[in-house]
Amino acid sequence: MTFNSQKIRKIFDEWQTSENGLNEEEAKSRLVKYGRNELEIKKISLFSLWLRQFKNSMIYLLFTASFISLVLGEWVDALIIFIILIINSTLGFIQEYKTERILEKLKNFIKVKARVRREGQLKEIDRSLVVPGEIVVLKEGDLVPADIFLFKSENLMVNEEILTGEFYPAEKTAKASEDEKSNLVFSGTSVVKGYGEGVVIATGQKTSFGKITEMTIKTAKESIVERNLLSLSKMILRIVFITLSIVFVLNLILKGFQINIPEFLLFSVALAVSVVPEALPLITTLTLSRGAIKLAKKDVVVKRLSSLEGLGSIEIICSDKTGTLTKNVLTVKDCLAEDKAKCFLFGILASGFFQSERETTHDPFDLALWQAASEEIKKEIKNYQKIWERPFDPEKRTNALVVKNLKGEFFLIIRGAVEEVLRDSKKSFNYSEIINQYQESGKRGLRTLAVGFKKIKEKDFFSEEDEKGLDYLGFFTFSDSLKPETILTIKKAKKLGVKIKIITGDALEVAESVAKEAGLETGERVFSGEELEKMDEGKLLWTVENNNVFARVLPSQKYKIIQTLQKKYTVGFLGEGINDAPSLKLAHVAIVVDSGADVSKEAGDIILLKKDLKVIVDAIQEGRKIFANITKYIRYTFIGNFGNFYAMAAISLILPFLPMLAVQILLVNLLSDLPLIAVSTDNVDYQEIRKPRKYNLREITFVCIFLGFLSSLFDFTFFALFYKTGPEMLRTLWFICSILTELVLIFSIRTRYFVFRSSMPSSTLISVSFLAFFLTIFIPLSRLGKVFHFLVPSFSSLFIILGLVILYFIATETAKLAYYRSHKEI
C-alpha cells in the first residue's frame, strides 16, 4: 500500500476527515447539508400523469367527435362524449398511478450497499447515505458509490466503460501520478480487481456521472410486448381508416346526397374509436406491474417490467449448482494431510479474513474451516500478519496470500483446486495416490480445497514465479447437502418444459454426483470447459443442447455456452460474481442474487432476494401466467371489436339511417372494455403455462378473421330479426346485444378448452363483468336511457336477444374447440 501524503493531507483538511472516517453525528449533519447520494431524476407529478392520458390518438378522435357534435348543435351528445373521454382518461390515470407506486415499491427492494469507516469501525450503509468526506472501502465486484480520491490501493483495476466507453479496465493507484485521474475513482464505475480506500469528494448530482445524467436522463426500456402490440394497434388503425373511407364512398354512391355527411363523419370517428384497442398498452403495463409486485412477495424483484415477458418464455436456465441445488452450507468431512494442524492453520490464513481490519467473511469454505479448527489453531492465527494478497482467480482457480509471523518469517500460501496446487508443488509426494483420493471424494459428491505453501524472503512485489515450487500440505473435503425442495423443483421445471443446465467451476465428479442426487439427467456425460473450448461450432451446439452438466468452466467458457444456446432457445442465466457480468448482459433474462457483486446486480433484469432454484422456477410460472392474460386481452378485443366494426360498417350501406349513434358506440366501447381491467387478475389453465409460449401470429390472424367473422354473422342475424322495429329501438336492442355477446365472449376466449372444464375465473373478473351486465340492462330501462337516445325495450325482445347471446356463446365455443383440436401447439 502507498500513501500520497501531500495530496491526501490536503483532501483530509478540505473535507475535515481522517483515515478513521466521520462520526455518526457529523455524517447525519452532512447528509442534511449535501443531500442524499442520488441522481436528481425529476419525478412525474400527478397533474402531469393525468395530462399524459390525453396524449393518445384515440383521445384526439374523441375530441374530434365531441367537436363535430357541437358543430351539429348536438350539445347533449357532445357533453356525453366529453364525459366518456374523462372517464376513459381517469381510469387510465388511476391504473398508471397504481403502476408508478408499484414500481417505486420494487425499487425499495433493491438496496446497494457501500462499505465506510465510521470512527475507525467498518460498516455497511445504504449507498444513498454516503456523504462527502466519508472514507469508503472498495473491493472486487463493488460499484463505486461516489467520486473518491484514493489514499490506499492494492492492485486496483476499475471498469470505467460507463463513462469513457473503454472496455479495458483502468489501473487506479494511491501513488503520486502525473495523471490525476489515476488517483480518482468515479461514481457508477465498477471494481474489477484489487482493494482501495479513499475520501468521497462528490456525491449525487455533483459526481461525474451525475453531470452526464443532466444532459441525458436514463429512461426505462420499453417492453417488447408493448412495442409490438402498439405497432399492431397502429396497423389496425390504418386498416380501419381505409375501410371507413371505402364505406363512405360506397354510401355516397348508393345513397347520393341523402346521406348526412357530418353525422356520418361522427359515426365513423366513433366506429374507429370502438375498434382500436386503445387500452392495450395500459392493460399490458398493468398486468406486468401486478405480476411484478406479486413476484416481489415471493423474493423475486423485477428491475425492468419488460423482462417479465422473457421470464415466461425461458426455455433453458443456466446456473451454478452451489446455493441453487445445494444449501451452500459446508461442513469439513476430512483433512487428507500428514500435518493436519498445519494444513488447518495455513488453510485459514489463506482466507485473509483472520484480521478484523476489513471485514468478516461469508465464504462457506472459510466458515467451515473456522468451525472445524481447534482452539489452539485459532490462537496461533493471531501470531500472523497479512502482508500481501491475490484474490481468487477463476482462471488459475487459486488465491494467494503472504503472511509474516512473530519471528519475522514470511510465508506464501496458495489455496484452491487440488489439480492446480499439485501442479505448482514440488513432487515430494505420491501424486497418483492423492489424485485417487481426490477423484473418489468427487464421486461421493464432496467438494475439495487444497493448500500449499513456501517460505520466502521479504520483498515488495510478488510474481507468478513466486507461486511455483510449493510444499504440498494436503486437501480438505467438504459436504454440501441438497436443499429439501431441489428434487421436486427439478421435476416441476421438467413439467413446465424448462431445461436446467448446471455450469460450475467444481470438479466433474462433484458436479455429476450432485446432479444425479438431484434427479437431473446429465445427458451423455459431464463435459469440462476445456473440452468445450476445443469443439467446433456445430459440435459445441449439439453438446450444450443435449447435455446438462458442465464442470471446471471458466467465465469466458460460460459466456460461450450461453451464446451458443441462444441460437435456438430463450436462455435465462443465474449469476452473482463479477465475472458473471458479461454472461448476464448476454442472456435473454439476467437473474442475479441479491448478495451478488454490485456490478452483476446492475447488469441483472431480475434480482433474487433468496438464492434458490425453486424461486426461479416459480417466477417462470408466474411470468407465463402474465403472458397468458395479456394474450386473452388480445384475443378478446380483436374478436369483439372487429366483428362489430365490419357488421356496423356493412349494415350502414343497407339501412337508410345509421345503425348506431356515435355516443351509443362509445358507450358500448366503455362498458365492454370495463371487464378488461380485471383480466390481469384472472386465473390461468395449467395447460397454458406448461411450456414456453411466444406470440402466435397465425392464432391472432385466426382470432381476427374467423371468430371476428362469426361475431359479424350474429350481428347480421340480429338485424334480420329487428330491422323493422325502427331506428331508436333497433339501436337500443343492438346496444344490449353487442355488450352481452362481448361479455360472454370473455368467458369463452379466456381458455382454449371447454369453458366448464377450465380454471375458475377470478372473482374480480366475475364481479366487474356482472357490473357491466347490470349497467347494460339498467341504462335503457332507466331515465338515463333517454340521454343516450334509447327506448325502453319489451321483455319479448330481451328474451330473443338472450337466446341470440346463448347461441353466439355455443357457436364461439364450438369454433374455438375445433380450431385448437386441429392445432396441437398447446
Image: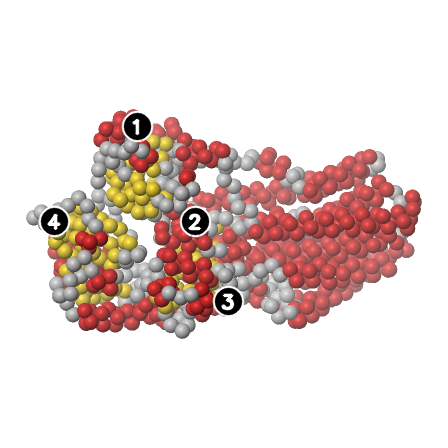
Give the mark nearest the N terminus, 4 or 1: 1
Question: Residue 579: x and y, percent?
Answer: 36, 53
Of the numbered discs 4 and 2, the one sitting upstream in the chain is 4
Q: CA distance from mark 4 to mark 1?
A: 41 Å
> Viewer-nearest of labels 2 and 3?
2
Identify residue for label 4: 457
Judged from the image, the secondary structure of the residue bearing numbered disc 2 is helix
Left or right of residue 454, residue 702 in this image: right
Instruction: Say which mark, if any, is on residue 15.
Output: 1
Where disc 3 sits, the SS reads loop
Residue 459 coordinates in the image, percent (x, y): 15, 45
Residue that protrudes farthest toward the left in the picture: 407
Q: Going 41% across and 57% down the picture, which residue do you hit?
A: 559
SS type, badge 4: loop
Please name the colour scheme applied to the rendered image: secondary structure
- Give, as a three-letter code, the residue at label 3: Gly
Label 3 crowd (10 A; few <14 / some 14-19 / many >=20): some
Of callouts 2 and 3, which one flags the residue occurring earlier in the amino acid sequence?
3
What residue is shown with label 3? 497
| Neighbour tally class for label 2: few under 14, some 14-19, many 20 plus, Cα within 10 Å | some
Residue 387 percent across, percent down from the top left:
17, 46
Q: Is residue 549 above or below residue 113?
A: below
The residue located at (30%, 66%) in the rendering is 507
Query: Which kind of residue does numbered mark 2 sit on?
Result: Ala
Amino acid type at image mark 1? Trp
- Residue pictured at 44% horizontal, 44% vertical: 108
Corner quadrant of residue 718: bottom right
